[in-house]
Image (spheres, rainbow, N blue to C red):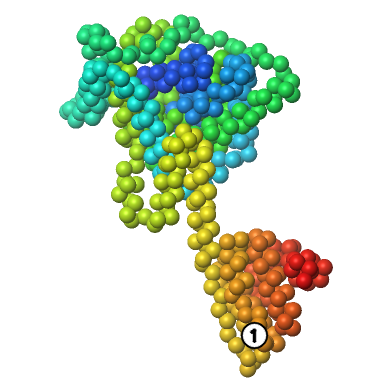
Amino acid sequence: MFQAMKLSWFSNIKGDTLAGIVVALALIPEAIAFSIIAGVDPRVGLYASFAICVIIAFAGGRSGMISAATGAMALLMVTLVRDHGLEYLLAATLLTGVLQIIAGYLKLAELMRFVSRSVVTGFVNALAILIFMAQLPELTGVTWHLYAMTAAGLGIIYGFPLLPRIGKSIPSPLVCIVVLTVVYMVTGMEIRSVGDMGDLPDSLPVFLWPDVPLNLETLMIILPYSLMLTVVGLLESMMTATIIDDLTDTKSDKNRECKGQGIANIGSGLIGGMAGCAMIGQSVINIKSGGRRRMSTLMAGVVLLLMVVFLADWVSLIPMAALVAVMFMVAIGTFSWSSIRDLKKHPMSTNVVMVATVVVTVGTHNLAIGVFVGVLLAAMNFANKVGNILYIGSEEAEGGRHRIYRVVGQVFFASSERFGEAFDFKETVERVTIDLSRAHFWDITAVQALDRVVIKFRREGTEVEMIGLNEASATIVDRYAVHDDPEAVEKLMGGH
C-alpha cells in the first residue's frame, strides 16, 4: 500500500510541482472568465477551482488530470443564476455532486464503451477549436503590442525546450509567463492583465450552506439544472480521462472518477463555489509540463488559492498575452492533426461521424450535444453495416417438394426487412426447413420478422420447420414468438 501511494503521489515531485504552478496560473483567468459567463462573482469560480482540484487529487480515478470550474458547466448555469440567484446555484451544485456519486456507484462510466474512436477524435478537435476561439476576444481591437507579446510567448514555449540542459528541466509555459510578466512590468505597455479580468479574493473560503428552503419547490427548481450539469460534467470528465489515458499510456478508474467528481462538487458547493468537471486544456498543460501524479493536481489547487489570496498584487500583473500564448499551445497540441491526413484513408462513414461531432460541438458550444450526435451517427452506421451482413440461401430437396433455407448472420431491427424479403412464399412446396444454426436473433423486431415468415408459409399450406437455433436465440424466440397462437397471429398480421 505504501509503495502504491508513493508511486501515485511522490514519484515525480519536481515535475508535478512545476506543472502544478503552470496550471494554477492558467486556471486563474479562466476561472474568472467562467464566473462572468455564469453571472456570479469571480470568487465563485476561483474557490470552485481550488476546492475541486484539491479534492479530486485524492478522490479522483485519474492521476494527472485537472478538474475545476469550466466553461461548458458555466453556460448551463446562466438561466438559474439570472432567475433565482447564487444560493440556488450552490444548492444545484450540491445536488449535482450527489447525482454524480450515484452515477459512479451505478457504474454509468461503462457507457463510455459505446463512444467510438471517431467520436473521441471529433471531441478532441472540437475542444481544440473552442479553446482557440475563446482566446480570440483577447486579440480583437487591441494594439500591436499584444500581438507581439503573444508571438514572443509562442516563441518561448516552442523554442525554450530546444535549449541544451535547462530546456527540458523547466516547463516552457512557466518560462513564458515569467518572462512576459517581467517585460510587461518593465515596459509598462498598455495591454490587459489578469487584474483587469475581475477582483481577486482577499480571504480564504469559509463553509457556506445554501440559504434556500429545503422543500419540493426548491428541488423542482434545481433538479433540471443539476441533471444537465451531471451529464455534461461526467461526459467531459470521461472523455478527458480517455484522452489523458492515451497521452500517458496508462489506465484510469472511470467509475471512481465519477464518484470523485461528485465529492469535489459537493466540496465546492459547501465553500461557495460553482460546479465543475475535468478540463481538457489544463489537463494537457499539466501533462505537457511534466505533471503525471496526483501531486500535480493538488499543487495546482493549493498554488491557485495561495496566489489569488496572498500574491494577488503580483498575479494581477500577469499579462493576458502570456496566458493566450499558453492556451494557443494547448489548442495546437490538443488538435489531432493526423485526423486530417486520415480523411483520405478512413471510410466515409467514419469521417462523417468525426466531422459531425466537431461541427455540432463548435456550433452549439455544448459538448454533450456534440458527443450525443456523434454517438448516434456511429450507432446508426454500425447497425447499418451489421444489418447488411446477412445471407439467406436455399436449396431444393425431395424432388422439389421440400426447400431448405439457410440463414447466416445477425437478425435484428436493421436487417429484419431483408430477412423477410429473402423467402419465396408463392413457390409450391410441401415443406420448408429454415436452418438457423448460423444465425442469431437479437430483438423483438427480429422475432416478429420470423413470425411473419412462418405465418405466411403456413397460409400457403406449407409445413414449416425451424432448426439450429442457438440457446440465446431460442430463448427470445420461445418467449416472444406468436406464430403458434391463432389470436396473436391475427393481431400481428393486421386481422387479415
Q: Is residue 211 above or below residue 23?
A: above
Q: Specify whether 261 is left or right of 29.
A: right
Q: Nearer the viewer, residue 160 or 459?
A: 459
Q: Amino acid at mark 1?
A: Glu
Where in the figure is residue 326, as x and y percent of width and height?
A: 31, 25
Q: Nearer the viewer, residue 152 or 80?
A: 80
Residue in the picture at 34% in, 42% down = 336
Looking at the rendered structure, the secondary structure element under dot 1 is loop
Q: Is residue 180 above or below residue 388?
A: above
Residue 161: quarter of image: top left
Where in the figure is residue 16, as x and y percent of width and height?
A: 37, 25
Q: Specify whether 184 is left or right of 357.
A: left
Can see residue 14? no
Q: What crowding class fits label 1: few (fewer than 14 Cα within 10 Å), some (14-19), or many (20 or more)? A: few
Residue in the picture at 53% in, 31% down = 233
Q: Nearer the viewer, residue 286 or 146?
A: 146
Where in the figure is residue 440, as x and y percent of width and height?
A: 60, 66
Quarter of the figure that contains the C terminus: bottom right
Q: Is residue 397 above or below residue 319?
A: below
Look at mark 1 in the image and give the residue it sits on: 427
Residue 269: quarter of image: top right
Where in the figure is residue 126, as x and y percent of width and height?
A: 41, 38
Residue in the picture at 64% in, 30% down = 224
Residue situated furthest bottom in the rendering = 399
Can see residue 403? yes
Residue in the picture at 57% in, 35% down = 231
Residue 174: quarter of image: top left
